[in-house]
Amino acid sequence: MFPEEVLEHVFSFLNSHTDRNTASLVCKSWYEMERWCRKRVFIGNCYAVNPRVVIRRFPEVKSVELKGKPHFADFNLVPEGWGGYVYPWIVEIARAYPWLEEIRLKRMVVTDECLEIVAKSFRNFRVLVLESCEGFSTDGLAAVAANCRNLRVLDLRECEVEELSGHWLSHFPDSFTSLESLNMACLGSEVSFSALERLVARSPNLKTLRLNRTVPIEKLSTLLQRAPQLVDFGTGAYSAEIRQDVYSRLADAFSRSKNLKSLSGFWDVTPAYLPAIYSVCSQLTSLNLSYAATRSPDLTKIVSQCYNLQRLVVLDYIEDTGLNTVSMSCKDLRELVVFPSDPFVGEVDVLLTEQGLVSVSQGCSKLQSVLYFCHQMSNSALISISKNRPNLTCFRLCIIEPRVPDYVTHEPLDVGFGSIVENCKQLTRLSMSGLLTDRVFEYIGTHAKNLDMLSIAFAGDSDLGLHHVLSGCDSLRKLEIRDCPFGDKALLANASKLEKMRSLWMSSCLVSFGACKLLGQKMPGLNVEVIDERENVNSLPEYVPVEKVYIYRTVSGQRFDTPDFVRIMGKDKDDLFSDKGLKVAVLFCSNFGTFRPCCCTRSRSL
Amino acid sequence: MNMEDGLNLTLGLPGRDESDKESCFKNNNNNKRSQLEMNDESNGSSDHAKEVDMENAPATKSQVVGWPPVRNYRRNNIQAKKASETESGMYVKVSMDGAPYLRKIDLKVYKGYPELLKALENMFKLTIGVYSERDGYKGSEFAPTYQDKDGDWMLVGDVPWEMFMLSCKRMRIMKGSEAKGLGYNV
């Protein structure tokens, strides 16, 4: 038995949440020791646990990270008002952790009142990161700016902010000098440039500055000159009439930014201004040109100079030729993201095909993470990619037209994706598209043992597909499915698996009200949320498929902040589990023959 | 000035385009919105936002909600660009109050404001009159306005022609009586 001090010292080296969670399971004294010295808490689903339970267990927390809505909320599949309110958490942590330093929220509803509480409750507050959040206005930001004397990081990533004025920035007092990171790229309103300039000038530790679109290109050189220590810079709208003096000043300012490693922004690019960044290209490890509607030659010229690039985010304007250049020039590339320039057009006038991805997979030996939108794919390309890059950890492919087969052979893409999961043994995240049958799920269930998150759309033939995934993917924690013919059988047969996962999303599938109710009744550790906006939903028979169902494990029972289109199934005391229900469940499970039925072997007691 | 007296029902903007959703989303929900615009948006604008979000895609493709999985702010950015700048021209929609359908014109075809206004006069069979910086289109029954990149409605003629071409997203010919507040002498 180690003395407490030694144990505490050892634990201080455990930084990952998983490691800490594991350590706390070793024995009771380790559990106690660990909980007293845990400083950072990560809650992947804000409805999985009650804030008071968290506070009771971890009394000395300095950093809280929470996630709210399911991932598909990013694509408008989660209706407005579903939930994800951070307010109850803020109230509790404000009371319990007066010395809290960091709050990180993703896909949550954050109100101005929440921000005001944060601003006034934590004397040593340092880091506020809001990613894909909504519900607050620039007034809330003003409160944070005015009150958080020791703020280091204000990072608004892709939030939807109600823009009342740009005046919030001016609320940082003159005595405020601790800023290290400011990301206001998602805001639309103009801030006072002189206030911004003065803020930058008095922030010697400022390393990250991501401007919004309203900061004109003429002003960039001023800011860069004020902050030569900048590491991460995001421009505003990168366009103006071509003026030699503006260009020269800008190019000069960039050339003096010796610490710059990351560039982004570049809305509305005037191509003639792009060469101003050439002097920093070789320093860059991260480049995001995904708002630059500029064509391949300009993009290629830039990437060809980015020898140290690790992360590249672009539009498909880069085309296969540009990616070929990437494969030859960017030998350190770890992550490639290619977004579509026009997601909806039928005819394609951009020459980006599967070939671009194949070349990058060939030339960039460190490539681990891919998000790629394109219009065509083939099994042979996928097989090549998997053989070139067995070290892939994240592979997300979106072929824009649903259910499109291999464009060469006209076969489904089962074999191609099968090859990905078979060769890329460290794959933790996979998103698939194109024409896919149950066969691909068999491959996934067989090989994808490290898969943590899987996204499926317009794929599969039957419940067998879902069953393969749920029964085979040992590490699966997040599964999101839309528009697939998966129904009750696979879900009920794998009910206990759902308790080992964070969440399952299924929309426009074939899961019935009855199955959802049954699942909710039998699994008290799960919230089975049916999200259905149809007006007549109360009168629909139980065999009708629900619009959407979101199932997640929880230790805090059902939530009570649901709107009327969300029903948490099977929790009503009146809904007792009947004999008929049991028979139906057994029938579903026995259809699988050799597969072990899960929920059905339970005793019939309630 | 209270514009909500019910007499300001605009028949204009029929088939109002889904690119209007830009004005419903974060980037354009700012206090720069003019009162005229406010009138159109005041009714159930949040429902409108939800609706138009789903009808984002032009009719060329079957419209599936949330597919392809590209986030809103990215779609807005890309589509706004595409709408106004194509290889073959810089087409913008033109609506006129009281007219049952919109027209489309290619701004690249005109060398400047005089040609543009003449073309509009011919197209809609009306007289627009002479522009002055101080008084706008005083003396005319109609005032040509346009919506710029920020979502604001502006009077045609205030900015240099090249700047207008780059920033004009759509146009609306307003009846003179409604153009108050846009330089029209009250």
Image (spheres, rainbow, N blue to C red):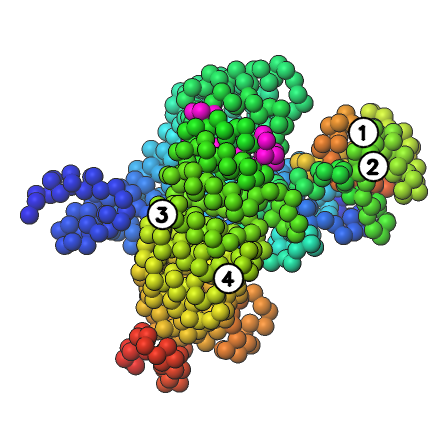
Q: With B114 as the anchor, is A510 left or right in this view?
A: left
Q: Residue at x 38, y 23 (%)?
A: A205
Q: Position of residue A263 (x, y in %)?
A: 48, 29
Report the span colored magenta: A281-298
Q: Provide the secondary structure element on which disc 2 rests.
A: strand
- Amino acid at circle 3: Pro
Same chain assignment for discs 2 and 4: no
In which quarter of the view is residue A533 placed? Answer: bottom right
Q: Provide the secondary structure element on which disc 1 rests.
A: loop
Which of the chains bears the disc numbered 1? B
Q: In this figure, which residue is indicated by the disc labeled 1?
A: B157
The kind of secondary structure the magenta stretch mainly shows is loop
Residue A390, which numbered label?
3
Q: With A21 as the anchor, is A100 left or right in this view?
A: right
Same chain assignment for discs 3 and 4: yes
- Amino acid at circle 1: Gly
Same chain assignment for discs 2 and 3: no
Residue B144, which numbered label?
2
Q: Quick check: A334 above or below A169? A: below
Q: Residues within 10 Å of mark 2 (few under 14, many from 20)?
A: many
Which of the chains bears the disc numbered 4? A
Q: CA distance from mark 3 to mark 1?
A: 60 Å
Q: Residue at x 47, y 53 (%)?
A: A380
Q: CA distance from mark 2 to mark 1?
A: 9 Å
**Which tag, 2 or 1, sits closer to the chain's start?**
2
Residue B171, magenta (yes or no)? no
Q: In this figure, which residue is indicated by the disc labeled 4?
A: A412
- Amino acid at circle 4: Pro
- Amino acid at circle 2: Pro
Q: CA distance from mark 3 to mark 4?
A: 22 Å
